[in-house]
Image (spheres, coloured by chain):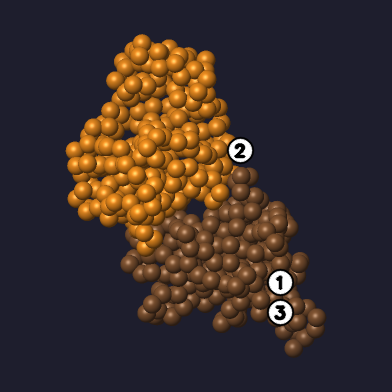
Chain colours: A orange, B brown
Amino acid sequence: MNLTLAAGASIAAVGIALHASAQHAGDISLTVSDGAIATAAFDGAATVPVRVFGASFGDTGVAHFTSNPGFEALPGTFATGSRVGFTPRAGLQRFTGDALAPAGEAELEVRFLTLATVIGAEPAAGFDLAVQSNGGWHRHFNFTLRSTGGAPPESGVYVAELELYSTDGATLPSAPFWIVFSDGASAAEHEAAMAWIAANLADGGTRCAGDLDGDGAVGAPDLAATLSAWGTPDADLTGDGDTNAADLAAVLSAWGACP
Amino acid sequence: MQQHHRISIITLFTLTTFAAAARAEKEPHLDLWITASDGALVTGGWDHLTGSVINPSQRVFEADFGIDPAFPFSTDEPGIGSDLVGVTLTMNLAPGLGRWNGDGFDLSSAVLLASYGGQSATTTAGGSFGFLVSAGLDLHPEYTVSGAGGTDPANGIYLAAFTVSANGLASSATFYAVLNLGMTELDHGAAAAWVESNLVPSPGAGAVLALVGAASRRRRR
């Protein structure tokens, strides 16, 4: 069984300042590939696998706020009646010029109507939204950057690492992907952050299902991590919100080097 | 004159029937497209998936509350697209919320809240929210209906009136959101067709309050 979650070898970083076309550019395009959710972007001619996405707070004139990027799955992508949601994989981080570091007092609120989560120093639980009646999923979350200290957050580049899941019981979660937010940073700094993440994190696009430590293979450390996370969502590979026998089976099935 | 009335009634009936038939099942509705023409803002119907403006003069937009059961009284449709990059647009929500009665709209005690980015407007007193148009804009304000005193609203088809404005451009003609809460798509289509036939041809009419009054007077005659 091929449980590869990698979006593919072609990892590219794209910004959101693209123009509308056949599929709405700027959104994170979602497909289901090899049984797992895959992220992609429309580059003006075709949809290509992408795991690093750019966004800018204030892009619609509201400081520290953006509703971009949106998510777009074409009709028929997901099972009707199911839900698709996101899980933060890490606390909010900030680009330092050559690495990512904890974002300090800054935190990111992700909201959709009355549902909200705050990604602070630690990852938080995400939430899911209904798939449309035609099997598509077009959603824009509201992202607000704020500071626990009450003062406006410092300008800079902030990074959220997420994965997507489906509640249909059959579709595996996506590989990790990153939304790289600029809050008053220069375009050069923003682009540098996206390039750094593409090269140093997303370029490990060989990470596969079961490769919990990201070393490019499924082995004893991943098995140990699965067992130690038993009964929690921490090593949930199947998207059912729990680490259980199904996740253990996924780890054992993928044993060895990632394809 | 009698002949004129008969033609109008037949036209309205035909429009309503066609619209209702086309709406027998739920289908995606068009988003709001905002552009400028001859110095004035103009609304149209936009398919964001294809990036195509399907109807360049559309002024009636449909959406359904409760597509997500987690939010039975809310929706983030219709979305908004625009090619006016660099322009700050203001969405103005008129006071008054109409509710479909089968052959027109009555003034409802329910309230519609429209919000985006921490700004909000309600149909209680009207209000506005603004946003800057960036390239590839695909904006989804949130709309929530509530009953009097914050209670759950009654099922129905609700009507809200908007204009859009911007510095240096004349404001748009009034356009309408026809929002379905728990009614059939047939009813929804009929209500939208009624708005199309009775309200859109009246340029300058600004508030649902006034429009509902006009509709009621027509019915009494």
Q: Is residue A101 above or below residue A206?
A: below
Q: Quadrant of the C terminus of chain A?
A: top left
Disc assigned to residue A40: none
Check the image and report above or below for A123 versus A231: below
Residue B107 has which mark? 1
Evaluate whether residue A220 shows in this view.
yes
Q: Position of residue A94 (x, y in %)?
A: 28, 42
Q: Residue furthest right?
A: B220
Give the side of residue B109 with respect to residue A149, left or right. Answer: right
**Quadrant of the image occupied by residue B157:** bottom right
**Disc 3 to disc 1: CB gap under 8 Å:** yes
A81 relative to B111, above or below: above
Front residue of A179/A21: it is: A179
In this picture, residue A165 sits left or right of residue A132: left
Q: Which residue is mark 3?
A: B213
Q: Amino acid at mark 3?
A: Gly
Visible residue check, residue A50: no
Question: Which residue shows up at 53% across the image and 71% down it?
Answer: B127
In the rendering, which numbered label is found on residue A81? 2
Q: Position of residue A130 (x, y in %)?
A: 57, 42
For this view, does B76 lie left or right of residue A91?
A: right
Horizontal side of residue A225 vs A77, given as left or right = left
Residue at image location 61% in from the left, 77% down from the top: B207
Q: Which chain contains the residue that carries disc 2?
A: A
User: Comparing marks 1 and 2, which lies closer to the viewer?
Assistant: 1
Parent chain of label 3: B
